[in-house]
Amino acid sequence: MLGKIQIKPHGWSWLWLLLLISFRVWFSVVLPMTGDEAYFVFWGEHPAGGYYDHPPMVGWWLTALLAFAHSPWFLRLPSMALPLFLAWCGWWIARPQGDERARYAAILILLQPVNVWNVLITTDTPLIFFSMLSMAAYFAALRGKQAFSVESSWHALAGVFLGLAFLSKYFAALLGISYVIHVLLIRRDYARFAGLSILFIAAIPALIYNLWWNSHHGWVNILFNFMNRNSSAGLSVNNPVLYAISLFYLATPWLLHEFWKNRNHVAVIVAKNGEAAVAFWILVIPLTLFGLMSLWRSVGLHWLLSFTPLFAILAAIALPLMTLSKLVKWSASFAVLHMLIVILIATQPIQVWKNSRLYDGIVLTVRAEEVLLKLEPYAKDYLFSTEGYSLAATLSYNSRRPFAVFGEGSFYARQDDFVTDWRTQSGRNVLILRKSQPSKNSYVPFFDRVDFSDFEIEGVRYYLVLGQGFNYAEYHDKVLLRIRDRFYRIPAWLPQYGCDFCDRYFQSSSH
């Protein structure tokens, strides 16, 4: 019975683990490379010290993986292994409470919804990995009576991993804030301030590196994450509701219900048990900060993933064993439901989605090879491009040739600004693939001659703009100048030592 799950060589838990791994391997193989994943592969194909949107860690990981293979399932191996790693960390953190509770921590982490279906390789993958390592080291630093040198070493490791998490995504800062609040308001041990100092000294090199790189590259991470993407932020009733729904989904309603039902018991355990207290506060602090953030902007579901394993760890430590058995049953049923839904969706013919507004993008992702065959006659004479990063990245990944982003685009995913040099395209032919019918007059100023064509795949019509004789001077004044003014407006108070985009196209007026 599910209620008697135990990790034994021939137990149900091993069958569940085999089923979960098999499902995840299958899904990683059949799922085409998504636009965001292909964009991060684009990073990996162009090794650099940093990238437009986020710190560079996932790009570095993908650069290493691309040296061996290019297939989606191989590039997704870090994401494939991540739930097993998180489960091991959960087991290790909960182990002082006994083997049975440690097993429940591992099982509950493996059965969390996102660990069932998420096989995508994104910036969140290294963020979650290093955040969990940092938290595990922080737990170890606070375990029992140990020599100051041992405790200091664990604090230093927590800081190193925090720094690496920060080089994955800026949301790692919330973990750092959690450490600070925990030390200032919760911890009472005599060495807490020394430990916090050691932790942050160990994390500082990553912060300094990131600031140094940004200062020499137009502060692109800062502009994107803290200015350009927040221009439309404002108070909203919907965002807190969506945040609450995300939290209920990721933690699962039955686990949150049991926390509430056993709240007095949990409060006693948190007050008396060191691991439970750390798990509680390192979980509650960032979730509270996200809740406050949701008052004026949308909080993405994936933003919470670094902290959701703590739900399972806290449950395994603080809830009664019979309750944990019940939670495993509910979570296992939910996991199977996820698997069945994913299998059902993945095995449906593509025409099922014909009435969806996403159908043109789905066809392009699933039938990328057919799209590329339609473009093949132009391959020798044209620079291939699209007007959005997702489409460009998807086609670039599938064709193994660059697709530039033509036009102004949006504040998202502007890494092509650093890769495509439009000065060198002057006089060349440019092909622009579109999912909607083009306005012919929009392209006339940028070329000596413009022709138009189209083709159909799976009932979707795609359009080609065939520009001959690219007019760089006109493109500079009507497109690149607007891009600079919209996306590269560096505040005067930031020290500026270089801006790739500005230096390339506006050398005389940059800085």
Image: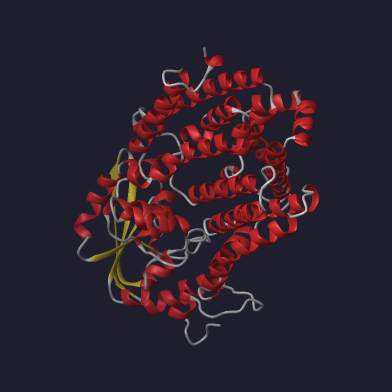
Can you say whether 313 is above or below 296 in the image? above
Q: Residue at x 57, y 55 (%)?
A: 157
Numbered disc total: 0
Is 45 above or below relative to 209? above
Of residues 318 and 41, the one nearer the viewer is: 318
Residue 402: x %, y % from top left: 31, 61
State the residue at coordinates (47%, 65%): 50
Quadrant assignment for the C terminus = bottom right
Q: Position of residue 44 (x, y in %)?
A: 38, 58
Q: Residue 208: x percent and y percent?
A: 58, 69
Q: Nearer the viewer, residue 177 or 237?
A: 177
Q: Quadrant of residue 231?
A: bottom right
Residue at left offset 63%, top offset 76%: 494
Say how the picture is coloured: secondary structure
Specify whether residue 380 is in view: yes
Toward the top, the furthest residue is 1
Residue 263 picture location, percent across and down: 77, 28
Q: Is residue 164 left or right of residue 493?
A: left
Inspect this view and state whether residue 437 appears.
no
Residue furthest to the front in view is: 147
- On screen, residue 264 versus residue 118, left or right, reads right
Quadrant of residue 340 within the rendered picture: top left
Residue at coordinates 75% horizontally, 29% vertically from top-left?
266
- Residue sitting nearer the eye, 180 or 405: 180
